[in-house]
Amino acid sequence: MLPNRLHAAWVVARRDFVAVVFSKAFIFFLLGPLFPILVGFFAGMIGASVKHDLDRAVVGIAMPAAQGDRLVAARAALVSAMPGGAPEFEVIARVQPGDRFDARAALKTRQLAAVVTGTLDAPVLTATEGRINDWRGMIALFAGRARDAAPAPLATVGTDVVVTSAANEHNGQVVTAQAGQLLLFLLTMLLAGMVLSNLVEEKANKIIEILAASIPMDALFMGKLFAMLAVSMVGIAVWGAGYGVLVVAGARSIPLLATPAVGWPLFLLLGFLYFAMAYLLLGSMFLAIGGMANTVREVQTLSMPATMMQLIVFFLASFALARPGSWLEWLAQVFPVSSPYAMLAYAAQNGSLLPHVIALAWQGTWVALMVRGGAMLFRRSVMKSGPARPRKRRAALA
Amino acid sequence: MGNEPDWAAIRAAKENSIVAEGLVKRFDGTTAVDGVNITVPRGTIYGVLGPNGAGKTTTLRMLLGIIDPDEGYRRVLGSERPTEVARRIGYLPEERGLYPSMKAFEAIAFLAALRGIPLIEGRQRALKMLEEYGLGHAAHRQIRQLSKGMAQQVQLIGTLIHNPELVVLDEPFSGLDALNQGRLEILIRDLAVRGATVLFSTHVIAHAERMCDEVAIIAGGKVPFAGPVDVARNRLRPQVRLETREADGRWRAALPADARCEKKMRGNTFWYFTLPESGVEPLLRALIEADAGIISLSIERAGLHDAFVAIAGEAAARALEQNREETETHAKKGRR
């Protein structure tokens, strides 16, 4: 019976795969991620431009005669050594001895972030509290150097670069784990939703009854699930190739991540397997939920709670990542739908392989259970089937 | 199930394509099928006759394993799990459906693949059968580009592509024009000649009467009769139609009590009554001796319609007739 089921699943998977991949809509699906990237790119450019304009802070200097110029010169000399740079300095007034300069009025009337008055010996910084906290030390440093008639040159710091440290390596692996989880989540979120509308076609075209009469329902579910997984793989391959082209063309760079504990080849293999498991787990759930829908509109209504559920699963795994060894990490690893995320993070931080074998077997078992459960639910609620109770009769016949 | 099972019938299941005993199906508290017993011998054409909503489709679905019965026993092609023998069954549901973007021959090959035929072989068979059915020109057209009738024929070919032992057709004549109904009747008979068992549901008595070896009359989820069509008809005594010259006379005493005078034509009188248990000869003798002036006497065997009325009741017969009229109207609209 199992070969029959597998054959049936294969027939369904082949039909679905061909129907999806060779449809015009699939081209739009492949181009789908391009639109948010383009929108993000342009929004980022505009945002950066606006931020640059807003962040171009100018500090007005109102000091007696040459003192203001000396302060500007001191800034110019030290700005390259300042971490994060320093605001622009602009002499706005050369105050005569005995004159008072109204710094508050200047802040109201001119585009200034702060105003420095007083003398080099006793500078006064007028600004908002946040600016004062940020710049007080900087003004003191510049004023101190400006006071010195012949300032000493800055010392040259010798450097000794080490590749990594234990702390850096751990932090790097956490970042790799986070990146792996994020990529896994994005791909699953992008692709698993497709499964929601998967049975609507069969219902709308009234072919579901022929399928139900011809093959076991769980074979139908399995076939549909693996077809969409294969479609996802095609999508990932195309997007990956596209990114590769951009890297080769020099438009993008590969993000530098710390080597995961299991090594890159194994990490990538595990990433592939955990993606497949995450997809199959969520997909089987979505397939069962989506199977209840009769129209595309109903599927759209269902997609919101489905997305929310994906987010919750991701948050659980992300939250657990920062708490290694806690019950939360254990929960995330054991809870079937969050397990792939949590275990991928585990692979980034821990080199042992046995837990992955167990986790994959555990997740695979749940895929089978959920497909079986989903198929039963579908038969009961959609095909209007009740529980079979012919056992007594069979026993009597035996 | 309240009744004691028919053990003899169950033991004979191996010689029958289908044996169902006491099938019960409830939906949301409503009993759709209530203790259906059906035995379909191998190689017969078997009709499930009843009005819409009688439980025909639910019964067929249970027999095919699409849904499970709440109670009862079923054995199809020797298996208690119909899905395990699905590859030996061809099924045409009442609601026809195919993937609209598939080409006709691909759709048939897909249906064949579902029944275990390799894809390449399925394609070859599909092209051959499409040619045989006069649809060769449509083989490479998408289903959505075909007319409704052509799409139905494509689906029918898909039902038969794997040479099934058991062919189950749910209301196969609905939506077809008279010409295609005739073709389908020939096809069903050919299937039976080849040795296949054909089980079909219908609400058109004429189809069942013309084609079926056996019928199950279903009404309100129950099957009050299942067996050979002749047995159903023989449940009613034959009707006698007597034409006499005179309207009255001493010969009237020879007529049974239920005799009714229907009409007078050219001075002659027509009498209708049930043939007495004693047979036609004593009746004829009595009428001649009493000088009835017989113009003609004919004996009419009961039709399946009469049997249906007698077995399922007037209400079910009216519903059946109403369904038939609705279907014809629908088919005419569809053709327009």
Image: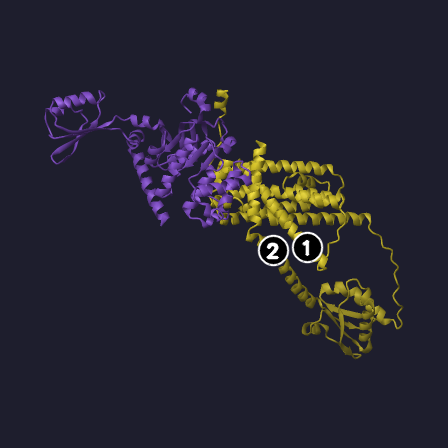
Residue B266 % position (x, y): 12, 36
The kind of secondary structure element at disc 2 is helix
The kind of secondary structure element at disc 1 is helix
Nearer to the camera, A334 or A31: A31
Of the 4 image quadrants, the one containing the N terminus of chain A is top right
Nearer to the camera, A122 or A249: A249
Label 1 packing within 10 angstroms: few (<14), some (14-19), many (20+): some
- Residue type pointed to by label 1: Tyr
Residue B218 % position (x, y): 36, 31
- Residue type pointed to by label 2: Leu
Q: CA distance from mark 1 to mark 2?
A: 13 Å
| Chain in yellow in the render | A
Question: What color does chain B have in the rendering?
Answer: purple
Label 2 packing within 10 angstroms: few (<14), some (14-19), many (20+): some
| In-image side of B236 versus B110 (left or right) | left
- Residue at screen point 69% across, 36% down: A358
Against B289, residue A287 (above or below) is below
Dot 2 falls on which chain?
Answer: A
Residue A243's disc is: 1
Against A76, residue A261 (above or below) is above
- Marks 1 and 2: same chain? yes
Q: Is residue B158 visible?
A: yes
Residue A383 % position (x, y): 47, 38
According to the picture, the residue beneath numbered tag 2 turns out to be: A31
Against A103, residue A397 (above or below) is above
Image quadrant in which you'd find residue A96:
bottom right
Residue B189's disc is: none
